[in-house]
Image: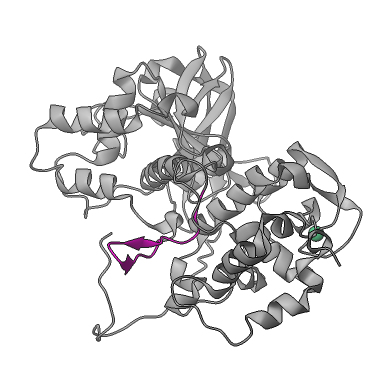
Amino acid sequence: MPIQTLHWRNNNNLKSIFAGKTFNAMPKITKFFELKAAIMGQDLLENDAAVSICIDCARHDSLKRTIQADCIPGTCGVCCRDDVTVRNPDNVEPMVMLCRALIRFYWEEFEYNSHFGGDNLLCLFNDEQNPVLNPVFPHTYWDELDHLLGDPPYPDWDKGISIYAGFLDGHRMMNRAIAGSQPPEISDLRKRLDSSNFAALLAELDALFDPFVDELDVIIPKDEIWFRARKGVSAEFHRYDGSFGGEIVRQPHIGNDIGPSPIPGNGRLNREGFPVLYLGTTAYTALAEIRPHPGHYVSVGGFRILEDLKVADFGADISRFAQNEVRLEMYGIVHAFDRMMSTPVTPDDTVRYLITQLLAEVLKARGYDGVQFRSSVSDGKNLCIFEPSKARFENGHSAVNYVKSLVYEAPEVPSISVPIAGDYKLDR
Ligand SMILES: [Zn+2]
């Protein structure tokens, strides 16, 4: 049989050549493919069965959209069905790089790098709760899929994304999950917020955003209605209808009473005494964002946007930054700010400036009207308008809501009373 027609899946001879051999420098399967390529020539790799991933197996919305953007009938390596709608195997790289970006986003490297005790990459998807891909089953195309997502393991930093951190000065490095870690540039700036010259920090943060901030631009159109909430009501009445009983009716806060405080405290995006207008996409988002307790009555009101607003959207889709390491680093910065903005200011925030306030200054100086970021307590989005007069309270959207209950999802996680040898303190 000519080499070019061999398929890796059926090629037990090749598998047996390397049976029992151990390679220490990188994940076994990867090393194997390198050796295989070296011995058999690149043609063999290029003739692996052309499996891809189908829309049904993609769980992440970004991944679904990326498959949809260039799809044909083909074979899915995840569910192993033929003639399903898959990403075009001849243009598979954007999907592969997005899968790698999502792995880097959600998982710590020790979970999938065997050198740190992790499982095979594809085993990550066995977790029914994973947000990226359906579990790979059956295993008909396991090797092809592993190859598709894992090779080459270390593309050039400006040409692709590596799921492994690789080596530095002979030491193996480990990637942290982007979803929960702080890029070093941000940690550094935060440490210096209390001691450094404000103008110098502004210039540094501006330079950090300069290469990509334009890509976050969105326009909030004039006349759109957004929502704001305030705990409590303006007044309560007993409505007597002439019979026994009647009912209690509540009058919501309206107008300036539900608008921004003219003398606000420290907020994520405003310094004490400088008002901004925080709004949510829906009444529920606005309500959830003020974090009321069960038993609270909450007034909700609508605000009309008075002119087209240019805002920076920090909830940007990861697929827009999933081409290579350089872009993924940018996304790490965007997401770190998105996370910080959606966390309320607490008494623990004792520094003179918050880095998110510094960001607001950078964006204002660049001509932005505000910032959009995800809500951590609802599916909606938040908007902070730097100049509150660019939106106005509007009658007809007001309501009073009663907070009946809250559900906390709080599974127990591994914990310790004192660290032991092998516990490395994380800087975050
Ligand atoms: Zn599938």
Look at the image and name its color scheme: one colour
Check the picture and name the quadrant holding the N terminus: bottom right
Residue 69, given in percent of the width and then of the height, sits at: 74, 37
Magenta span has 239?
Answer: no
Locate ligand 1 by image quadrant: bottom right
- Establish if 226 lies above or below 71: above
Is 256 in front, or is 97? 97
- Establish if 200 lies above or below 49: above
> Magenta stretch: dominant SS?
loop
Over which residues does the magenta segment extend? 161-175
Left or right, residue 45 beside residue 264: right
Query: Residue drawn at (31%, 39%), measured in percent from left and top?
Result: 268
Query: Residue drawn at (76%, 58%), measured in percent from left and top?
Result: 57
Res 158 visible: yes
Q: Residue furthest right?
A: 83
Is 300 in front, or is 174? 174
